[in-house]
Image (tube, rainbow, N blue to C red):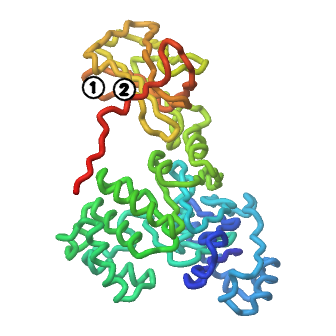
Amino acid sequence: MNSRRVITNSQHVASLTADQEVLVKVEGVSKKFCRSLKRSLWYGLCDIAGELSPFGRRDIAEDRRLEMVDGAQSSISHIPYTPAVAARDEDLREGEFYAVRDVSFELRRGECLGLIGHNGAGKTTLLKMLNGLIKPDHGRIEMNGRVGALIALGAGFNPILTGRENIYINGSVLGLSKKEIDEKIDEIIDFAEIGEFIDMPVQNYSSGMQVRLGFAVATTLDPDVLILDEVLAVGDARFRHKCYHRINKLIKNSAVIFVSHSMDFVAAICRSVALMQHGRMSLYRDPIKGIEAYNNLNTDHGTESIDGGAVFEIYPPVKAATVRLQEKPIGYGEAFPVEVEVESSEIIHNLTLSFTANDQQERPVMNWSLERTGTAWDLPKGRSVLRFAIDPLLLHAGRYSWNLWIGRKDSIEALVYAMRAGHFDVAWTWNPVAGIPYQPLATNFNVETKT
């Protein structure tokens, strides 16, 4: 088994210059699992026996590497390394599959990498290997400095101990002395906003309280590498803003890996994006390009969502639906015509419709809805064509994804539901009648100086 996980001392890291400082280095990492528990246990015993056997075959490149090291484990990160051969399907035993396959990337101090992908793409498996919870089957992971991680709700907390006791335990795991934790504990408690509950067992905390405490511990103890997995999914808007502020401060002196299914969070925080798909990774230096690729992940049939892909679903008595938009770019302030053709097997009464748009960072920027007019309509049996126009369309130049919802006015159940089902483009245009895009005058602005 060709795997290495090297952790160098943070004092060595501090001696490096900023342009040389690679805090996370992943080379050809692969991890496989078995779908059957019994078979997995048997394979585990076989692998352990193979590792302990003095006659086990070792990779030639690894033998040469160990000869160069000559027992000096502390210098292993300075020895040239030949990554393991790429993971092959023929290496898999019955029932096995690759959860992570041939992943390589580097992350330097001052960088924040957004790790995105559908559920089951391999994100959490990769994070567990980075944090040392499991080891790769192939490849090498090098983590330099102190690593802080929050990769699961309440991970690392002992439920029967108090919040205060868990802070000291987590700090000790990160290598801090009791004195260092004493200096930080008030800041941790204040950030987590659970002061009156800090001496209560963690098992009695709500999910939000656990995340706040875990985030406070992971970020307050000044890690060199910070790993965050969906930590902003729980918590109110004010706490999420505090988290953004803390992460932005940490990025200056740390390497951050941020996992989220909320693309607006990724766009706001990350400098680059790594998209995981079926265990493989694609890197995008432009986060917007990575988010666009994430949103374009569809199933083979193109009708079901894979965490950010397109959705176009219809429900009885609706039998078919088609949306047609203007193909050429729409100018700012122009009318944007939309046509929806719907086929129904029976008459449907009291319907309403909404047509919304998101920008490339997945932020909602437009909501056209009949709900605000109080208007409802009836859909006759057979084929019908619905036409409406968004006039004027006040969106700046760029590409937007659109969403459509048709349903009964007194129900939340959709009859036609489309999410990211297509795109439309808005172009800069100069219209001598409409003028330039709306720019409010900067009136009533003054500065008062107090002495």
Q: Residue at x 43, y 17 (%)?
A: 392
Q: Please tell me whether mark 2 sits on a helix, a strand or a loop.
A: strand
The reply to whether discs 1 and 2 touch (Cβ–Cβ < 8 Å) is no
Tell me the crowding category of disc 1: few under 14, some 14 to 19, or many 20 or more residues within 10 angstroms, Cα based: few
Task: Classify residue 82 as left or right of residue 145.
Answer: right
Q: Amino acid at mark 1?
A: Ser
Q: Which residue is mark 2?
A: 414
Q: Quadrant of residue 350?
A: top left
Task: State whether residue 139 appears in this view.
Answer: yes
Q: Which residue is mark 1?
A: 411
**Outermost left residue:** 196
State the residue in front, 324 or 128: 324
Q: Please tell me whether mark 1 sits on a helix, a strand or a loop.
A: loop
Q: Position of residue 159 (x, y in %)?
A: 29, 73
Name the image quarter holding the N terminus.
bottom right
Task: Classify residue 34 as left or right of residue 232.
Answer: right
Task: Classify residue 445 as left or right of residue 344.
Answer: left
Q: Residue at x 23, y 67 (%)?
A: 194
Q: Amino acid at mark 2?
A: Ala
Quick check: 167 above or below 232? Answer: below
Q: Residue at x 41, y 71 (%)?
A: 218
State the residue in front, 169 or 147: 147
**Outermost bottom residue:** 71
Quick check: 269 above or below 181? Answer: above
Name the image quarter holding the C terminus.
bottom left
